[in-house]
């Protein structure tokens, strides 16, 4: 509690006969020296008789405590030795603190104690304060100890803050050291990997150099023979001419050039780096950024070889097999645009017909991947007549005998009757995701992933065998009308190749590749054994001849991905990516 001492004594001497003990303070402020006859306790001022009457009438001061005569003198005498308390009561703001409650350790004014502390042990505050020396000493000791405790805590806090800073600096230093170690290791690994790549490059460059040297030697020998022949002929050296002709014949029969060319084709010009992008621990374990591989490729040369013999990637050594014995009377000269077929049904907004299959001359079954639906189209009216929903995305569909289809849905093959209405009658689950599917005689061939392979089923979905594949990236599969050949569309990102593989049931393979094919997807083999291939990324259809050596590009088809052929009407139905329509062509 803060208090101040103020002694009141307004005795003013006029320096004349009128000497007063106390003067009126308000009048004194106006330069008048009038004797005071009263004292206001609240204002702490002496008042003359005139000011006293005004004080009693004024609203702000009429309730003040006014002392006169002897009482005023006693109060003033007491004020000389008693400390005046100016601290206001917390409850009654217009009253001063006067009492202390020992029971409740409470300070308050008269009003507080009159209403709330009638029965309490009270002390008048001036009396309570007379004997507080011991309490003052005790509280100082306690405050000193508390101050010392606070200073100790502050020192500990400062020490703790220094420890945190030191720990942080230490951690950052270790991070930087470790990062430097990692950088050094990565630099070493990069140098090692680049060295391996450089060695691989140098090895193949040396092979090319060897081919070049062999060719130069052979060319030099040929030129010498030509020079000798011309000289012998000019000089009429008949015997020498005859001998050199025989030597030239022997040289011409040599397969040296063919052998050199073959060795050139066996040189790998492409390298692949499959980085361990999701397994950084393996980088340090094997001390390499990834698997550095040579890709089996062939060299593009200006030789008149067929297009299929170049850019074959890992298929360069595959031999061509016999041409299918099919309808030789059939001939595709060109495709005539017939129009579009709207394939929306119900609440469809956008369709994505990924594949289609002709089940009869007047029925077409569609695989709508966007809406997860199998749809039946009446080709006489060109309308969707029925549909069934699937629980997974659809990838491909193939026609079966008896107006039935088999559809790859997720990791299942779904069998559907398509006579009048669509009706699912059997489901065969497989152990991995399915892609392309094709019917071939008495078997169904299904492309499955991880690893890429072909699962052979019978027409009822019973497992028969697994056919391994030596490559990845197969998406679609189809068969020839005579059931002798399987055709696989192969889009290999690793080898940057776009090829079509023709495979016999005995495992023999031949390969067609062309720069005109980019992103081969759905395919259909026509009556003459030629193949129509959807070339997705360059928006075209590629027509491969039955000899599997030549092809041509048919432009103007927007992102084709599936294809169907109606043998009776000789119409081709092309499925377009994210489109509500099929494009119809007639075969001419």
Image (cartoon, rainbow, N blue to C red):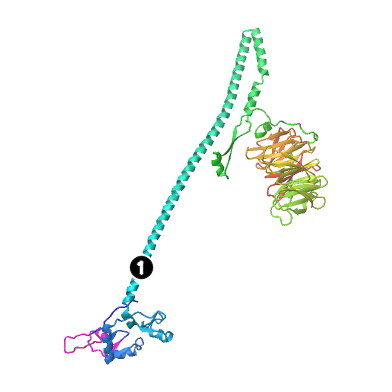
Percent from the top left, x then y, of residue 81? 26, 83
Judged left or right of residue 206, residue 82 is left
Percent from the top left, x then y, of residue 111? 40, 85
Percent from the top left, x then y, of residue 21? 22, 88
Taken as a whole, is the magenta stretch helix, strand or loop?
loop
Judged left or right of residue 354, residue 80 is left
Viewer-proximal residue, 174 or 367?
174
Judged left or right of residue 187, residue 567 is right
Viewer-proximal residue, 143 or 87?
143
Q: Is residue 146 above or below residue 111?
A: above
> Which residue corresponds to the image point at 43% horizontal and 84% vertical from the top-left?
116
Q: Quadrant of the N terminus?
A: bottom left
User: Is residue 523 among what the camera can see?
Assistant: no
> Which residue corresponds to the image point at 79% horizontal and 41% vertical from the top-left?
443
Looking at this view, name the residue that lies furthest to the left.
Answer: 16
Percent from the top left, x then y, of residue 203? 57, 29
User: Where is residue 139, by image quadrant?
Assistant: bottom left
User: Where is residue 220, by image quadrant?
Assistant: top right
Viewer-proximal residue, 325 or 448?
448
Magenta region:
11-40
Q: Is residue 481 above or below residue 237?
A: below
Mark 1 residue element: helix
User: Is residue 290 among what the camera can see?
Assistant: yes
Q: Is residue 387 above or below residue 138?
A: above
Q: Is residue 80 above or below residue 255?
A: below
Q: Which residue is mark 1?
A: 145
Viewer-proximal residue, 529 or 316?
316
> Which residue corresponds to the image point at 45% horizontal and 47% vertical from the top-left?
174
Task: Indicate whether residue 184 is drawn in magenta.
Answer: no
> Which residue corresponds to the image point at 72% horizontal and 31% vertical from the top-left?
320
Task: Indicate whether residue 27 is drawn in magenta.
Answer: yes
């Amino acid at each position: 509690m803060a208090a101040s001492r103020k002694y009141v004594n307004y005795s003013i001497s006029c320096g004349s006969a009128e000497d007063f003990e106390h003067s009126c303070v308000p009048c004194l402020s106006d330069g008048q020296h009038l004797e005071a006859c009263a004292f206001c306790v609240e204002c702490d001022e002496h008042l003359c008789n005139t000011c006293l009457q005004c004080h009693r009438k004024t609203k702000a001061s009429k309730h003040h405590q006014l002392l006169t005569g002897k009482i005023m003198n006693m109060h003033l005498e007491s004020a000389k030795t008693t400390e005046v308390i100016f601290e206001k009561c917390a409850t009654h703001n217009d009253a001063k603190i006067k009492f202390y409650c020992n029971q409740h350790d409470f300070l308050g004014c008269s009003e507080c104690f009159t209403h709330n502390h009638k029965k309490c042990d009270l002390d008048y505050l001036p009396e309570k304060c007379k004997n507080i020396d011991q309490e003052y000493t005790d509280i100082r000791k306690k405050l000193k100890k508390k101050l010392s405790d606070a200073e100790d805590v502050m020192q500990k806090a400062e020490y703790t803050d220094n420890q945190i800073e030191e720990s942080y600096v230490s951690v950052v230093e270790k991070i930087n050291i470790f990062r430097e170690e990692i950088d050094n290791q990565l630099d070493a690994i990069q140098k090692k990997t680049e060295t391996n790549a450089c060695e691989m490059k140098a090895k193949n460059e040396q092979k090319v150099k060897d081919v070049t040297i062999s060719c130069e030697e052979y060319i030099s020998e040929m030129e010498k023979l030509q020079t000798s022949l011309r000289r012998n002929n000019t000089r009429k050296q008949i015997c020498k001419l005859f001998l050199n002709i025989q030597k030239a014949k022997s040289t011409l029969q040599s397969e040296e050039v063919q052998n050199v060319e073959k060795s050139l084709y066996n040189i790998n010009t492409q390298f692949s780096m499959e980085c361990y992008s999701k397994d950084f621990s393996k980088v340090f374990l094997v001390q390499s950024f990834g698997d550095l591989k040579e890709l089996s490729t062939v060299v593009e040369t200006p030789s008149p070889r067929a297009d299929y013999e170049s850019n074959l990637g890992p298929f360069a050594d595959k031999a061509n097999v016999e041409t299918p014995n099919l309808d030789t009377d059939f001939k595709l000269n060109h495709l005539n645009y017939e129009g579009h077929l709207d394939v929306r049904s119900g609440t469809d907004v956008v369709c994505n017909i990924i594949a289609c299959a002709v089940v009869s001359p007047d029925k077409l079954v569609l695989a709508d991947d966007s809406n997860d639906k199998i749809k039946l189209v009446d080709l006489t009216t060109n309308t969707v007549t029925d549909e069934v929903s699937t629980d997974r995305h659809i990838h491909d569909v193939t026609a079966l005998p008896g107006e039935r289809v088999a559809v790859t849905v997720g990791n299942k093959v779904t069998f559907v009757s398509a006579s009048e209405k669509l009706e699912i009658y059997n489901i065969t689950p497989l152990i991995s995701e399915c892609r392309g599917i094709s019917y071939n005689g008495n078997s169904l061939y299904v492309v499955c992933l991880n690893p890429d392979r072909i699962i052979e089923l019978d027409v009822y979905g019973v497992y028969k065998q697994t056919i391994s594949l030596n490559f990845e990236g197969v998406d679609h599969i189809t068969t020839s009308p005579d059931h002798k050949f399987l055709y696989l569309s192969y889009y290999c990102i690793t080898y940057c190749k776009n090829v079509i593989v023709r495979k016999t049931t005995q495992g023999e393979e031949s390969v067609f590749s062309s720069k005109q094919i980019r992103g081969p997807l759905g395919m259909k083999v026509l009556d003459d054994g030629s193949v129509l291939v959807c070339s997705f990324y360059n928006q075209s259809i590629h027509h491969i001849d039955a000899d599997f050596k030549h092809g041509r590009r048919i432009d103007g088809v927007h992102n084709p991905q599936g294809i169907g052929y109606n043998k009776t009407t000789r119409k081709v139905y092309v499925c377009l990516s994210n489109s509500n329509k099929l494009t119809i062509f007639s075969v001419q």
